[in-house]
Image: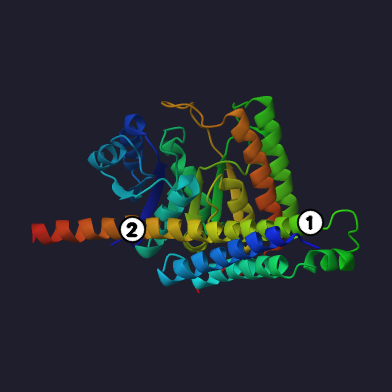
């Protein structure tokens, strides 16, 4: 059924207003793509809106956070035999038109995990606030150092995965604020990682979930989990096609 | 030496604690693995209450001269810290298992809906 198709994993919490359009946009890219919306126990009609737009919906019985939601979608992709997957946010900030660019290194067999970044090599028009820019920089340096490969943006949730990456993250994925740590886990498990430059949009509905206290928790939590992850041993993932 | 009245109250209280723990195990409201911690506490308290020279003796071993009951507070604090640390590990494990279950439910429900849908069409 899913041979050769792509699973688009979209975690969503209370995105009733945006999710329909997000799903429709992904489906209108012309790719052989199935949209899998993971409804993280929304209090609104996110699930129905996603289903009406033609997505498969996985509804979690209670809120497990972004990492657990993404992992649910990746477990689905693994169990249903999808060879490739992409992950986009449910609020519409990731532009589905960038998907072919994101998937290109995987189609060419050059990478297992592709991160869509707004600032590869300093390009792109996006200028985040200073504090955020510093945070992104510091984490990128730390992951580069601990993972042994240079990365410039580890906070992006706009990613493409091949079968190896799907299997790795379906089995092991951090639960809260997962992106940075997941990048390091991928590197330490021997996945080939590439970054591509993409444009992102401003949020269409809702507000950013980062407040000051959360920002502090974010920095401390991510730093700690990076250090712990670098002390752990990860089994090397099997080479593709074996 | 511990005053006799304090000693008696201590003995009664620690026996009560042990009985409550045993009753909780009997009623299956407390798992044996956690109950062991509490039974050990009860026994330590019982020994320290009944053995009226005990606190002074133990304090003497540890070099605490000024105020022997300080040993009791130190031991109690350490014990509570260990119990809480243990609970944090239990909570972490339960959280992970909970998330795993939630994910499986979401996946199974989707699969169930799909097979229902296809059997209705057939």
Alpha carbon distance from label 1 to label 2: 53 Å
Above or below, A13 against A32 in this view is above
Check disc 1 and report the residue beneath it: B69
Name the outermost residue toward the front. Answer: B4
Return the x and y of residue A66 as percentages of the image width and height: 48, 45
Residue drawn 33% across and 58% down? B105
Residue drawn 36% across and 40% down? A26
Above or below, A208 against B38 in this view is above
Return the x and y of residue A240 as percentages of the image width and height: 52, 68
Image side of residue B66 versus residue B47, left or right: right
Residue drawn 68% across and 36% down? A135
Q: Which quadrant is the C terminus of chain B positioned in?
A: bottom left
Image side of residue A43 versus residue A109, left or right: left
Name the outermost residue toward the bottom. Answer: A242
The crowding category of the residue bearing disc 2, from other C-alpha atoms within 10 Å (few below 14, some 14 to 19, many at least 20), is: some
Q: Which quadrant is the N terminus of chain B positioned in?
A: bottom right
């Amino acid at each position: 059924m899913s041979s050769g198709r792509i699973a688009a994993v979209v975690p969503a919490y209370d995105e009733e207003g945006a999710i329909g359009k997000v799903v429709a946009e992904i489906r209108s890219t012309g790719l052989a793509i199935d949209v899998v919306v993971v409804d993280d126990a929304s209090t609104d009609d996110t699930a129905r809106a996603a289903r009406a737009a033609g997505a498969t919906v996985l509804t979690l019985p209670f809120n497990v956070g972004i990492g657990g939601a993404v992992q649910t979608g990746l477990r689905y992709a693994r169990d249903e035999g999808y060879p490739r997957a992409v992950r986009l946010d449910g609020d519409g900030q990731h532009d589905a038109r960038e998907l072919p660019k994101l998937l290109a290194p995987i189609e060419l067999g050059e990478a297992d995990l592709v991160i869509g970044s707004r600032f590869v090599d300093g390009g792109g028009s996006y200028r985040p606030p200073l504090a955020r820019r510093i945070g992104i920089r510091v984490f990128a340096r730390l992951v580069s150092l601990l993972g042994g490969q240079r990365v410039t943006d580890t906070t992006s949730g706009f990613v493409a995965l091949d079968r190896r990456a799907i299997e790795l993250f379906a089995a092991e994925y951090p639960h809260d604020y997962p992106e940075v740590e997941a990048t390091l886990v991928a590197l330490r498990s021997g996945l080939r990682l590439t970054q591509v430059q993409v444009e992102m949009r401003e949020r269409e509905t809702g507000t950013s979930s980062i407040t000051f206290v959360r920002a502090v928790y974010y920095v401390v939590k991510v730093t700690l989990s990076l250090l712990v992850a670098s002390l752990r041993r990860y089994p090397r993932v099997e080479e593709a096609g074996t | 030496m511990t005053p006799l009245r304090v000693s008696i109250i201590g003995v009664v209280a620690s026996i009560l604690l042990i009985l409550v723990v045993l009753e909780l195990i009997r009623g299956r409201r407390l798992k044996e693995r956690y109950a062991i911690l509490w039974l050990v506490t009860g026994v330590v308290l019982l020994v320290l209450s009944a053995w009226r020279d005990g606190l002074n003796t133990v304090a003497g071993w540890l070099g605490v001269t000024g105020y022997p009951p300080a040993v009791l507070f130190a031991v109690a604090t350490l014990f509570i810290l260990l119990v809480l640390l243990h609970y944090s590990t239990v909570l972490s494990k339960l959280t992970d298992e909970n998330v795993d279950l939630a994910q499986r439910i979401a996946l199974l429900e989707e699969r169930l809906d799909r097979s229902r849908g296809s059997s209705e069409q057939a």
